[in-house]
């Protein structure tokens, strides 16, 4: 049986509550929102969606921390999200993302959670300096 500390998920892109993505409804069926948090990493713009990479720099990505409602459903629920994020690929293909455990700071309190990191090259992609996709899109839509 998995411990609760490993049944959390940090989201920074289309799965954030403000986006009302169809997958968000799925997420909230199985997970509840613990609050807004940050994780060490850099955010980049890849056309229509953001991608994140871990970093050793003092750079943070803003997002939301979710916890599974029923720990027994975690493996199944995260499997569905792995599908959504394109982790399950045909043999010989590399997945677009990889899921990894990270430390998320929730109001300064460290928590262990899963995050989806981009698994491709970021060459030439503009960095989202603020690390906050919502803020970035609001500013972009104003210009």
Image (tube, rainbow, N blue to C red):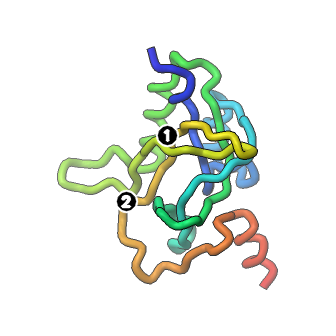
Query: Which x, y percent locates residue 125?
Result: 48, 78
Q: Secondary structure at mark 1?
A: helix
Q: Which residue is mark 2?
A: 119
Residue named by callout 1: 81
Residue 45's disc number:
none
Q: Please state, as top left, top right, bottom left or bottom right, where the N terminus lies in the image.
A: top left
Say whether marks 2 and 1 touch (CB < 8 Å): no
Residue 119 place in picture, x, y as percent? 37, 59
Tell me the crowding category of disc 2: few under 14, some 14 to 19, or many 20 or more residues within 10 angstroms, Cα based: some
For image coordinates 53% across by 74% down, the residue present is 47
Separation (CA) of disc 2 from disc 1: 16 Å
Quadrant, the C terminus = bottom right
Q: Nearer the viewer, residue 66 or 47?
A: 66
Q: How many C-alpha atoms fall within 10 Å of the one at disc 1: few (<14), some, or many (≥20)?
A: some
Residue 31, how many percent across, how many down?
64, 31
Left or right of residue 18, residue 6 in this image: left
């Amino acid at each position: 049986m998995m411990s609760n500390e490993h049944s959390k998920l940090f989201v920074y892109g289309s799965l954030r509550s403000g986006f009302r993505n169809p997958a968000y409804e799925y997420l909230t069926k199985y997970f509840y929102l613990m609050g807004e948090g940050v994780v060490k990493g850099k955010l980049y713009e890849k056309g229509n969606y953001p991608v994140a990479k871990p970093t050793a720099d003092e750079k943070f990505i803003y997002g939301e921390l979710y916890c599974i409602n029923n720990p027994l459903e975690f493996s199944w629920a995260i499997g569905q999200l792995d599908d959504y994020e394109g982790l399950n690929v045909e043999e010989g293909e590399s997945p677009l993302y990889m899921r990894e455990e990270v430390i998320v700071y929730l109001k300064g309190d460290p928590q262990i959670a899963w995050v989806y990191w981009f698994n491709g090259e970021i060459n030439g992609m503009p960095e989202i300096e603020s690390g906050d996709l919502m803020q970035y899109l609001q500013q972009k839509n104003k210009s």
